[in-house]
Every structure is written in structure tokens, then in C-alpha cells.
Image (spheres, rainbow, N blue to C red):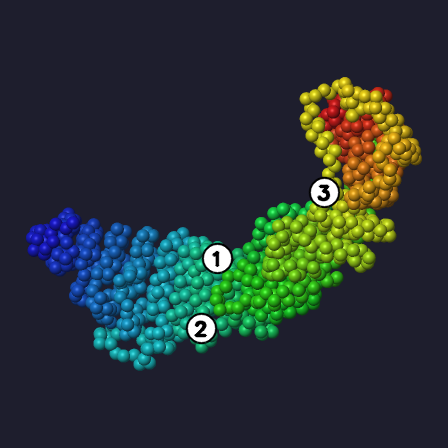
Amino acid sequence: MAVFDTPEEAFGALRPVCVQLTKTQTVENVEHLQAQLQAVSDSALQELQQYILFPLRFTLKTPGPKRERLIQSVVECLTFVLSSTCVKEQVLLQELFSEISACLYSPKSQKPAAVSEELKLAVIQGLSTLMHSAYGDILLAFYEPSILPRLGFAVSLLLDLAEQEKSKQIKIAALKCLQVLLFQCDCQDHPRSLDELEQKQLGDLFASFLPGISMALARVITGDFKQGHGIIVSSLKTFYKTVSFIMADEQLERISKVQPKPAVEHRVAELMVHREAKWVKNTSDKLTILIKKIIECVSGHPHWKVRLALIELVEALLLKCSQSLVGSAGPLLKALVGLVNDESPEVQAQCSKVLRHFADQKVVVGNRAFADILSENLHSLATSLPRLMSSQDDQGKFSTLSLLLGYLKLLGPRVNFVLNSVTHLQRLSKALIQVLELDVTDIKVVEERCWNSGPLGASETAATQPRSPMQRRYFRFFTDERLFLLLQQVCQLLGFYGDVYLLIDHFMELYRESVVYRKQAAMILNELVAGAAGLEVENLHENHIKTSTEELREIVTSILEEYTSQENWYLTTCIESEEVGEELTMKQSGLQAITSGAHTCQVTSFPAFSKPSPTICSMNSNIWQICIQLEGIGRFAYALGKDFRLLLMTALYPVLEKAGDQTLLISQAATSAMMDICHTCGYYSLQHLINQNSDYLVNGISLNLRHLSLHPHTPKVLEVMLWNSDASLLPLVADVVQDVLATLDQFYDKRAASFVGVLHALLAALAQWFPDTDDLRQLQGESAGEAGSHLSQRPAASEKGLENTTTAEDMELFLLNYLKEKDVADGNVSDFDNEEEEQSDPPKVDESDTGPDVEPPLPVQIQIATDVMERCIHMLSDKNLKIRLKVLDVLNLCVVVLQSHKNQLLPLAHRAWPPLVHRLTNDDPLVVLRAFKVLRTLGGKCGDFLRSRFCKDILPKLAGSLVTQAPVSARAGPVYSHTLAFKLQLAVLQGLGPLCERLDLGDSDLNKVADACLIYLSAKQPMKLQEAARS
């Protein structure tokens, strides 16, 4: 709180200090005065302003050299007084302005005096405070032509400090002070609003400084990035505020053609500038050069605040100087549009705001409408786009595509003026087609296969997931993924703002025109539909009307028909003789059946592919085309939402075909498309999608099976349905399964491989849908009885023998069952049924049964498994290795499904035994491995039925093979563990124990097994074989 509130009290306290400073100009006296000023109120200071300023000004005007510290103290004290008072006299303002500016005057050079940074900063702050303290009318009167030399000196002084100084603080302070001098500071109360006449008066005065200011600031802006973003931001603001004020269209329109003669000296009058048309033209041309340099440097500046200041520069110049800076409109617009996809959200938001402002106003640059300039720039860019994409680096390409995207955002609905021109549309479309050209030379696309059939991934959470990610693809002209995202946005904006029917028809023509254009055109069509639906599109034009749902559905329907047509959907994606080649490859491994003599696993060398053949490139191209079309179906589902349900009858069946494709990329793309359909149509999983639409899917399968030569992929649809459904599907597909079996019988020699895949999916589904209850109870019993007695491993018969309540009837029943199983084990199957009939004939078995002995009908799954197993028995000897392997898998699943129905399983097992023995003893090692797996399953489910057969046909050869192979594995190296021979040994050693336990072998047979396994306990054997032999 001030001590001296009245001028009288303040004068009494300050008078001795002022007198002392007038007599002796020292730093201590100045500091003493400033200390006393702290205790004086602002009102008292205002009354005593000139009295207090007198000793300070007297100190500055005293001739002779003075210490820098003294000058600095005086200027700081002046600044304090001016910050608390107002300057109300024009003469005082002019004199103080000259005296403070002169503190940095150097008579020996045109640059500022070589003084300390503290003094320079004090002078800058003093000038700024002086201009802010000036009374409103006094300040405007200050800016008269006579002040031009002194003002020019201060401006050049501040520009030199901003350009030459190393201190960032001084640079920024000088730039802010320059804004104050030019009436462009950010203060709320300074300057006050100016009328038209005052603006013209100041504009005429400042025009003399425009060349020097603009060139100096341009040098600062385009200087080293290391000087800091704050300096560049402040320079940019000073530049565009000064230029937009002096070159403002509103001022220049009121400039008379004849220059009035100012009432000043001749030398001062020569400094005045008349802003007539010629001067405007010359100045505009020179400013255009500087603006281009500034934009080129700043648009790629690493700091987002600098790029934000550039947007402000563009907005100010285009709005205020659209007529005077016609030549700069193109570069300014290009700079603005290029920042529309900036990595900084602040820059993006400001850029979008400015673009929206321009789009809503009918801005005219020169004599041309804003949209006309954009159209020309867009056409020019589209023409050079392919060349730029092939010659620029990734950053340059990113800037170019950002520019293209910005033009489209800015044009908005006016883009139709460009698209309605045939030349414009052809240029743009051909540029997009060329830029989006894929690199199809990668052989891995063809090599990646989907070998293992099974349920499609992520089916349980499809409804909660966002849109499926797009597969990574590689392009010829760029590698950065951001560029593809920009191209997607370009196409989406075209679909959103443009004439959708025109664009769809044009790109559909390109799609049909050439195979070279087809993939790119499909990508563009997908994004056009997404854009027309408004997906992920930022609308800068609120009055724009989107495409209606009915129109969009018609467009999607036509594109779907083209995508799923015979010539575009069923493309060659693999070599037809692939299965034969794989079979030869497997046979060349040097391994024979397990019963052959001692041999080693030989590594066969295959000829390497010297170059990807054109056939591989074409298959690669076809794979990508199908993937793009599948992704398009997913995009269409998102575009239509729930309305896509109306198109499921035509879209779902082809997608299911591709979901079962062996090419990994195609299968993944089809799965993603189905997940997109689930998400948009309200299905909570792929299983729900298939179940809800299974009626017409099954109908389509049934119809296409009748014309299998025209629809060879029909089995794949049924296979995918079975893998991804539940038991509710079985009643629907039961009849279709019979059609499949009948078709298999008819086309066995041609279509066996695809049908076996369907049978495998069918039996795997049945095993999952109808698990055996005995297996579940057995697992529970085993877990509960782990702590019990392990003396006897016999099943039910031995357990009954331990019971104390055994009756005569139990013993009789046991003996009858034993005799029956003994006959069955000896192969007396023909008597098996007769024995059952004889047991069922005596009336004493069930005296109340008066009706005929009619067996209940078999469940559907049992009947299907029986029919499939009958086919498998015939196909076990197929010449194709892949089919034999698949048939063994199906046979194994048949046994699992039929395990609870022995009357059906045992006769079929009897018929399957001879070909299975042949597979085990005289076939490829891969087949032997798979056949041994089937043998283990049969042994577990059939039990005593196989005991004598196993001991007679299989056990001697298995034991002999183990003995024969033991020396080979004993002397083999570490690579041996990767061979088929090792895997076969390991599987036999691991499986023999459980198999012998299930079959309840006798002592002599067990001795054979023990002798064969004993050799593998040697320390020379691989560790895994030792562990398997011990188990």
C-alpha cells in the first residue's frame, strides 16, 4: 500500500532525491529514486510525472560517455514511471520515444550499439511500455508523417535485434515490441478500434517499412530450427499481421490514384509511399516470393505451434488480402490444405475450422471464385500425382496426398464441378488407379496355405469387436502404411461429396476394362461405398445431403453381383497338380513302412525356384483380388447396417465358400467379412449367423450338388457350416449328407479330396455335439479312484470278482459273456447275430414281452457315422496320399461316435481291419503314424474284440520294427529327432503300453512288447525314446 497518497506528500519525499540525481548522475541515486517511487500512489505519480521524468531524461541527455549500468538503471526507472502513469502530451511522447531509442544508437555503424543484453532488454521493454502508456488520441497523433524517420530508426533497431541477437528472450521481446509499434499487439485495450480513415493513415505510414519488415522477418522465419519455435511463431504473427494490415483489400480500395502532398519536409515526403495499383502489383509479386519461401520452410517444421501459426497466416492473408495478393493465393491455399491431416490434433482442429469457414463463404480471389482455383489445383495435382508418387520419398508422398485430401475437403459438394468434367474425372481416376497398384511378386502369398481345417477364429466375440483390421498389402509406389490410409480417405471423400452413381459407373468400367486395373478399382469401389454411407468421414459442409439407404442398397447390390460373378469370384489361386506334387515330395523322403528293414531318414534336396514364374504372379494377383472383394463385402455390411440382412441370401453363400479356401489370405479375409456381417446385422457370433441362415444355405448346397461340375466349391460351404455350428444344424443337413455320400459315390475319382474334407468336418462335429456319456463317467471314476487299489487292472469282470455278494446268476452271466466275446475275438462274426437271436428267442428271458423283437431306430448321428465309415473302408486304399491320411482321420472319428453302439461298430471294425493292417504294415510313414492312432482308438473302444487280431497281425511286426530301428536311433545324431522314423518310433513306444492294457494281452505277448522296449532303455538312445520306453 502506498505511503504517499497526495501529490504534496509525494513531492516532499521525492524532491530531495530528484535534486540529488540532477546534481550527481549515479546508479545509486537512480536506484534510490526508484525505491522512493515504490511508496507513491499512481495518482500522485501522474501529477508529478514530468517532475520525476526530468532528472531521468536529463541523465540520458547529458553529453559525454556514460556507463551502461547507469543507462540501464535510468531506462528501468523510466519504464516503472510509465507503467504507472499515462503520457498525455504528444511532444513528450515523441521526445521520450527518441531518447529511449537513442540508448542503443551507434554512430559508428548502422547496427545497434554493442552493449549488454540487459540494457538491450531494458530499452525494448521501455519502448513497449511507452507506447502502451500513451493516451488514445495522443498515440494516433504520434503516427504522423513527420515521425517517419524516428519510427523507422526504431523499427530497424528492433528488426536487427530480432535477427542478429543470440538471446531468445531479446528476440521475442523485440518482435513483440515491433508488434506494439505497428499497432498489432495482442493487448485487449491497445490499440483501440480504428475507423477507416485512421486505418488508411497508419497503412500509408507503415507501407514505407513493409519491404524491410517482410524481408527481415522472412530471414528469421526461414532460419535455423534450433533458434526455437517461440521466435518463429512470433515472427510469423508479426509478418502476417503487418502484411494483412498494409495490403488489406478494404484499405487499397479507398486509395486515390493521385498521391496527396503531405505537409512535411521534402526529405520526409520522399519516404512516403503511395499505395496505388502499380505499387500493389510490384509489392505483391515480391511478397509472393517471400511467402513461398516461408511456406516451404514452415509447413514441415517439427513443432506443432509453428504449423498452427502458419494456418493463422494463411487465414489472415486469404481473408483480408484475397485481391491484393492474388499470386500468393495458390501457395497459401496449398499450405492450408497440406495441413489437413497433420499429426497434431490441435493443428488438425484449427485447419478443419478454417477449411469449414472457407467452404461456407463464397471467397473470391482476384476475379476468380475460390472453387475454380481449387478445381484447377486439383486437376493439376491429379495429373502429376503418379509422377510424384514414383519420384518422391515417403514424406513427400505424404504431403502430396494430404494436399489432395485437403482440396477435396475444401471443395465439398462442389467437387461435382470437377467430376462432371470428363477430363478431370479421367485424370483423377487414372492417377488413383496407378498409385494403388499392388506389388504381386511376393511368392509367400501363394505359399501360405490353410492346411488344418477347423472352426473360424474369434467367433464368440464377433459382435463386440470393431471393424476387422485390413490385411497388410504392399504397393509398388510406396511402403508407408499412412499413405494408404490417406488414399482411403480420398476415396471416401469422393464417395461422400461426389455423384455416387457417376463414380461407381466410372470405376466399374475400369474394373471390367482390364485385369491390371481390377484390384485398384475394387479397392476404390469399397471406399466409395463406405464414404457414401458417411463412415469415418469428417463433414465440413453441414448443408450436404448424404446418399439415401435405398440408393446405397441398389449400388451395393450391383457391385456384389459383379464381385461374385463366375469370372471374378472363381479365379485360379493354386496349381491344379498340387496334390500330386505333394505326394511325390512325401514319397521321396526315403521312408517306407514300419515293417521294412533298417534304414535311415535321408534328407532329399529339392530344386530351388530360380524366379517367381508369371503363373505365380497371376495367382498372387488373383488372391489379392478375391481378398479385396471380400473386404468390400465387409465394408458394404458396415455401410448398410441392419439393411444388409436383405442381401444375405446372395452374399453369405459365396463368403462361406471362400472361408473354406485353402489359401490362408482368402480364408482370413472371408472370416473377417463374416465377422463384419455379424457385427452390423446383429448376430452375436459366426455360429449364430450360420444357424439363423442355415435353411437357404442348405437349400443352395442341395441344388448345387446336383450340378457339381458347375459348382465344384459346394462341399467347402457345407464343411465351413459344420465346423461353425451346433447340433441344431443336424436335422437340416441330414438329407444333404446323404446327397453328399451319393455324389461321392458318383464322382469318387474326381472329387474325393473335397468330399473327404466334408466328411471329416461332419464327424468332428458329431463327436463334439454328441459326446459319449460312458467316457465322461469313466473320467470321473478314474479321478475318484486314484487313491484305491491298483493290484488288478482288469475291467468290470475282475471288479465283480472282488465283491462279496456274487450270486449264481452273476457267475452264469459272466461265463456267457466270456464265451460270446471269445467267439467274437476268434473271428466268428457270422455267429454273432445268430447268438443274439438265440438268446432273444426263449420266452423265459422276458415273459411279459409278447410282441416281436423290433430294435428302436438308430439316432441320426449314428446312422450318418455308419454310412460314412462304410465309405471310409473302401477309401482306405486310395492311391492319393492326402486322401488316405484324411480318411484315417475320419475313420478315427467314426469309431469315437459309434463307441456306444457296438452292434454297428464291431461289424464295421471287422470289415475295416484288413485295409487298416495294410496301412500299418505297408505304406508311407505318415500313413503308418495316422493308422497307429486309429488302432489305439479301436483298441480303446472295441477291447477284447481286437485282442487276437492284434496279437496275430500287428504285434509281431511292431515289435520287430522296434528292434530293427533301435540300432539306427542309437547311433543317430540330434537331427534324427526331426525325422519321420523317430516320430514313428516315439508314437509306437508311447502307444503300446495303453494299447496292451486295453486289450488285456497275455503274458507271452507282453514279453514280446517288453523285449522290444527294453532295448530303448539304453543310454545311447535319444532321451525321449528312453522316457517313452519306461512309460
Question: What distance separates the C-alpha of mark 2 from that of mark 3?
Answer: 68 Å
* Dot 1 or dot 3, earlier in sequence: 1
In this rendering, which labeled residue sits more in front, label 1 or label 3?
A: 3
CB of mark 1 within 8 Å of CB of mark 2?
no
Q: Is residue 373 left or right of residue 853?
A: left
The local secondary structure at tag 2 comes to: loop
Q: Which residue is mark 2?
A: 362
Is residue 11 something one can see in this rendering?
Answer: no
In terms of image quadrants, where is residue 78?
A: bottom left
* Dot 1 or dot 2, earlier in sequence: 1
Is residue 857 something one can see in this rendering?
Answer: yes
The amino acid marked with disc number 1 is Asp
Q: Which residue is mark 1?
A: 342
Question: What distance separates the C-alpha of mark 1 from that of mark 3?
Answer: 54 Å
* Dot 2 or dot 3, earlier in sequence: 2
Q: Is residue 267 left or right of residue 756?
A: left
Residue at (47, 60) in percent of width and height: 339
Q: Is residue 338 left or right of residue 857?
A: left
The local secondary structure at tag 3 comes to: helix
Residue at (46, 55) in percent of width and height: 344
In this rendering, which labeled residue sits more in front, label 1 or label 2?
A: 2
Question: What distance separates the C-alpha of mark 1 from that of mark 2?
Answer: 26 Å
In this rendering, which labeled residue sits more in front, label 2 or label 3?
A: 3
Q: Which residue is mark 3?
A: 769
In terms of image quadrants, where is residue 871?
A: top right
The local secondary structure at tag 1 comes to: loop
How many other residues sit within 10 Å of disc 2, few (<14), some (14-19) or many (≥20)? few
Using the image as rendered, state which of residue 312 and residue 60 is in the foreground: 312
Eyeballing the image, is 589 above or below 751?
A: above
